[in-house]
């Protein structure tokens, strides 16, 4: 089962490993699918991420984004989106209750590469807007409880644990796959096949 958003833990080669702090970057490099991200207003991280992107041609950017708790400024988000465009890299967004602001930035900058909006719990209409811009939503445990869940699973999506790789993450990921497959009235194996087809744009 492919994990569209995981964190550093046990080694896994079929998960996108996301980071949110400079201290995690060295460990992230050990995973085939890895990202350099920031969830704070640490301006110094921008130059570090850019240097890593220049050397590490397989790296994504992420996670980064806008949260009701104001993790990052609009200016920092704009800079990271511009890096994604300049270096032609996929990226992972963290957005909580600030989707309209993020959509405005995406429409302004047009990064051009596919991206993931992780732990998606917003509306089907917002998911449509991201899809028009080249994004895919990623569903996790919290997504199962969103009021638009039955509409979201009729769209393109990926599935995530949002946990450090290891047995607990594997169990959580399996629970989400099984719950979504049951709601779609298909087998878990068929859902895995569908996910594998969608995730190809994020894998080398």
Image: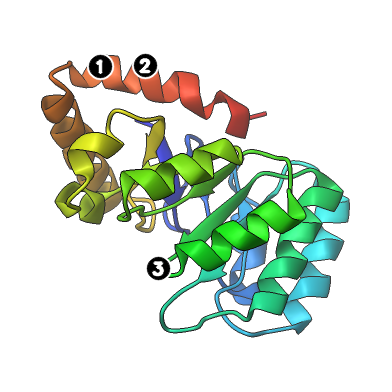
Residue 96: numbered disc: 3
Vertically, is 203 above or below 135? above
The mark nearer the N terminus, 2 or 3, is 3
Write down the residue under mark 2. 193
> In the image, residue 138 lies at what x, y percent?
39, 44
> In the image, residue 157 lies at what x, y percent?
39, 35
Residue at point 42%, 51% (across, down): 10
Write down the residue under mark 1. 189
> In the image, residue 93 lies at what x, y percent?
53, 57
> In the image, residue 60 lies at what x, y percent?
67, 49
Distance from label 1 to label 2 (Cα)?
6 Å
Element under disc 1? helix
- In the image, 9 versus 80, the foreground residue is 80
- At label 2, counting other C-alpha atoms closer than 10 Å, the crowd grade (few under 14, some 14-19, many 20 or more) is few
Circles 1, 2 touching at the beta carbon (< 8 Å): yes
Element under disc 3? loop
């Amino acid at each position: 089962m492919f994990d569209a958003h995981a964190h550093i833990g046990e080694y896994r080669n079929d998960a996108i490993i996301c980071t949110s702090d400079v201290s995690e970057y060295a460990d992230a490099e050990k995973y085939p699918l890895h990202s350099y991200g920031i969830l704070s207003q640490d301006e110094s991280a921008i130059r570090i991420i850019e240097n890593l992107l220049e050397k590490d041609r397989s790296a994504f950017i992420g996670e980064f984004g806008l949260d009701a708790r104001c993790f990052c400024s609009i200016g920092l988000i704009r800079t990271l989106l511009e890096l994604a465009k300049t270096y032609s890299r996929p990226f992972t967004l963290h957005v909580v209750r600030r989707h309209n602001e993020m959509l405005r930035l995406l429409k302004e900058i047009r990064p051009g590469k596919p991206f993931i909006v992780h732990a998606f719990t917003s509306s089907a209409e917002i998911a449509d807007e991201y899809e028009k811009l080249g994004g895919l939503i990623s569903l996790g445990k919290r997504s199962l409880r969103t009021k638009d869940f039955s509409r979201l699973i009729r769209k393109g999506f990926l599935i995530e644990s949002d946990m450090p790789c290891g047995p607990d993450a594997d169990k959580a990921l399996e629970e989400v796959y099984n719950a979504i497959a049951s709601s779609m009235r298909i087998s878990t194996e068929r859902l895995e096949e569908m996910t594998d087809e969608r995730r190809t744009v994020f894998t080398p």
